[in-house]
Amino acid sequence: MIKQAEYIKSAVSVSDLPVDDLPHILLLGRSNVGKSSLINAITNRKSLARVSGTPGKTITLNLYLLNNSFYLVDAPGYGYAKRSKTQTQSFLKMIKDYIKYNGHLKKIFQLVDFNVGPTEDDLNLYRELQKIDIKLVIIATKYDKVKSSFRLKQEKEIRSKFLDGQLLYVTSSESKYGIEKLVNEVINFEEDNH
Ligand SMILES: Nc1nc2c(ncn2[C@@H]2O[C@H](COP(=O)(O)OP(=O)(O)OP(=O)(O)O)[C@@H](O)[C@H]2O)c(=O)[nH]1
Ligand SMILES: [Mg+2]
C-alpha cells in the first residue's frame, strides 16, 4: 500500500537527480496515454502529478518519493506532433541519458492505451527496451474507455503484440481498476526489490 507520497523535484539531466540509494521506477509512454494520471491513481491523490487533456503536459523528469522508499518518475511523452523537432530530440536525449546513467533505475513501466492498443511508436520503444537489462512492465491504461463486451478480446489482442511471458497489467486511473493489483505485485519495494 502507498501510505505516503511527495513531489521531490523536476530534473532535466542526470546531475539533477537526488544523491541517495533509493530505487527508481520510470514511466514511459505516448503523450496523453495517462502517465501522470497513473501516478495520481497509485498514490491515491487527485493532483500530485499534473494531468491535462492537452498532450505534452509533462516536460521534465518529475520525481515522486513514495513510502519514503522509492521514486516514481514521470517523463515527457513521445509522439506529440506539435512539439518541435529540437524539443523532441532533447527530451529523447534526456530520457536516454537517465536510463543509461542512473544506476538506481530498477524498473520501467511502459504505458499503452488499452483502447488504442500498442502503436508503431510503442512497439519500437518496446523493442529498444528489450536490449537493456532493466525489468519492464507493460501497463495498459484507460480500461474504463472500452465497452465491457469488447474488453476480453482487446486484452488478448494487446497481449499478442508483446513477447510471451511479458508482464502486463490492465488499469484505469479513472475507475481505479487494476491499480491495487499493480501496487501489490509490482510496486513492493519494501520487500525485495532493492
Ligand atoms: N477515461 C480515462 N481517461 C484517462 C485515464 N487516464 C488518463 N486519462 C485522461 O487522459 C488525458 C491525459 O492524461 P495524462 O495523465 O495527463 O497523460 P500523460 O501520459 O501524462 O501525458 P503527457 O504528460 O502529455 O505525456 C487526461 O485528460 C486524463 O484525464 C483513464 O484511466 N481513463
Ligand atoms: Mg504527463
Image (spheres, helix red, strand yellow):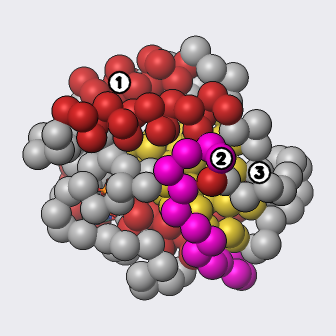
Q: Quadrant of the N terminus?
A: bottom right
Per the rendering, the mark at residue 9 is none
Q: Which residue is mark 1?
A: 123
Relative depth, front residue between 47 and 123: 47
Q: Amino acid at mark 1?
A: Leu
Q: CA distance from mark 3 to mark 1?
A: 26 Å
Judge left or right: residue 67 versus residue 139.
right
Q: What residue is rendered at 59% in x and 25% in y?
A: 165
For the record, the magenta segment spans 1-15
Element assignment for label 1: helix
Q: Earlier in the sequence, mark 3 or mark 1?
A: 3
Q: Amino acid at mark 3?
A: Pro
Q: Quadrant of residue 116?
A: top left
CB of residue at label 1: within 8 Å of ligand 1? no
Q: Is residue 11 magenta?
A: yes
Relative depth, front residue between 147 and 49: 49
Q: Quadrant of residue 14?
A: top right
Q: Is residue 66 visible?
A: yes
* Label 3 Cα neighbours within 10 Å, binned few <14 / some 14-19 / many ≥20: some
Q: Position of residue 78 (x, y in %)?
A: 30, 40
Q: Is residue 118 visible?
A: no
Q: What residue is rendered at 63% in x and 53% in y?
A: 16
**Marks 3 and 1 close (CB-CB < 8 Å):** no
Element assignment for label 3: loop
Q: Amino acid at mark 2?
A: Ser
**Marks 2 and 1 close (CB-CB < 8 Å):** no
Q: Which residue is mark 2?
A: 15
Q: Which residue is mark 3?
A: 23
* Label 2 Cα neighbours within 10 Å, binned few <14 / some 14-19 / many ≥20: few
Compared to residue 40, the image places residue 112 above or below, namely above
Q: Is residue 193 magenta?
A: no
Which mark is in front, 3 or 1?
3
